Amino acid sequence: MSTSPGICWFRQDLRLHDNPALLAAIDCGEVLPVFILDDDNAGNWKCGSAARLWLHHSLNALQKSLEGRLSIHRGRAEDIIPRLCRDHQSTRVFWNRCYEPWRFERDKEIKKRLQEQSIDAQSFNGSLLWEPWQIMKKDGTPYKVFTPFYKSARTNANATPAVPLPVPDNIPLMRKDSDGLTVDDLKLRPDHPWCEKIERHWRIGEENAQIVLEEFIEAKIDHYNHGRDFPAEKGTSRLSPHLHFGEISPRQVWERASEVGFDDNIEVFKSELGWREFSYYLLYHFPRMPYDNLKSKFDRFPWWLNEQWLKRWKQGMTGVPFVDAGMRELWQTGHMHNRVRMIVASFLVKNLLIDWRHGAAWFWDCLVDADLASNSASWQWVAGCGTDAAPFFRIFNPVTQGQKFDPDGIYTRHFVPELKELPSKYLFSPWNAPQTTLEQAGVRLGDSYPCPLVDIQQSRQKALDALKKVSSSS
């Protein structure tokens, strides 16, 4: 056992359970746990506002678990890690891998620098079920379609998800680094009433992540396949921000779901974990995915940026109730139901003809679970320009989607209370309601609630016409 401390560099693994880097550091003897807010290297991909709010609370929870010994820093990790090694005579550094392109390249450079200084740097898989390079086609190229990727992953004996590691009984923590900052010093939580509004909807930290998982297993997984589509039923797991920040690992979630048994609900839930994996897989193999259309023909698509329409979409004031409900849920809670995410994204891209990257940027800033892999892959999926994408001509009708998946209007009325007295027959298309019906419900279109930005059918046809021109010129 080494007499110098092992540095455990926490990143998107803010937990003690199933943390291979932490256990490796413990094997060295004393452990110096470290967190670095590296906005310099992150550039455009530093945490958005809602994710920073989550990170503030998650770090506080981890600091408590580590008895106040977490050494917190802000700056370029390639400068801070070697300095900490020098200051503490540490010759071993451990971390769990991240897969965002900027992190992956930075970490390779850090490992190289440390090894040149005779410092042992080791990285582990603490964030995925399958490493992106494990699941490849027979010709050695990456999969581009989810179903064969997932089938291959499930049947690959060499890629069986590892059993989660136990929480260590005792962590021989060093005294707190005197040069470290406090969580408050990072100024992650803005002084704004918006924060309190979002905080009311979440329980943050590793301990709470375990509780959320158990509540889902006990009360929701038995009807997940049906319930996940209805936003008023709250049938989803709501684990995505906990997974993103690593308060719980996908291996823990996968194993717990497997313990329940085998049926359609459990398998569908596991496939959602598989979609998360596929998003990281695509990001690893196609690192330009956050910026570039994966189907190059969409580089010629005639997007039309109407700044006023984009603003109205962000505000949940498009005049299309189911879309507006989703956008207001996002602003008020830092989250949006999965099905509604597809509908609001489809409306932006295919009815307003606004480039998907504008929508992805707004989600990046407003989602507590903002994840570069999932955000990019999902927006490209909806826009039809991804490798495994819904075809562009698949355009969600927000009126019929609302009628089907919010049949009693509970979700829509909650987030669009201006329309709460409107009969369900007209709730999702108030422009079709007779004037007397609107008056009885206290609705004044263009005043108390906006008129729709576009005609649903006409804008759909305009999008299809644009696609036809792009396809004919390819």
Image (cartoon, grey):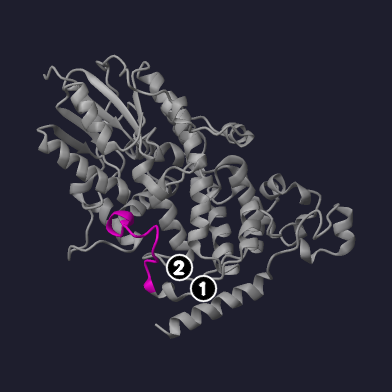
Image location of residue 326, percent across then percent down = 61, 51
Q: Give the range drawn in magenta.
A: 282-296
The answer, for residue 130, to whether it is visible in the render is no
Name the foreground residue: 349 vs 145: 349
Tag 1–tag 2 contact (CB < 8 Å) = yes
Label 1 and label 2: CA atoms lie apart by 8 Å
Residue ID at (37%, 45%):
42
Work out whether mark 1 precedes mark 2 in sequence or the reverse, and give the earlier one. Answer: 2
Residue 384 is tagged as 2
The kind of secondary structure the magenta stretch mainly shows is: loop
Disc on res. 393? 1
Is the N terminus in the top left, top right, bottom left or bottom right quadrant? top left
Residue 325's x, y, as percent?
A: 65, 51
Is residue 109 magenta-colored?
no
User: What's under tag 1, amino acid-wise?
Assistant: Phe
Residue 152 in the figure: left or right of residue 363: left
Q: Residue at x 75, y 63 (%)?
A: 451
Above or below, 458 relative to 254: below
Q: What element carries label 2?
A: loop
Q: In which quarter of the image is the C terminus?
A: bottom left
Q: Choose between 303 and 149: the one closer to the eye.
A: 303
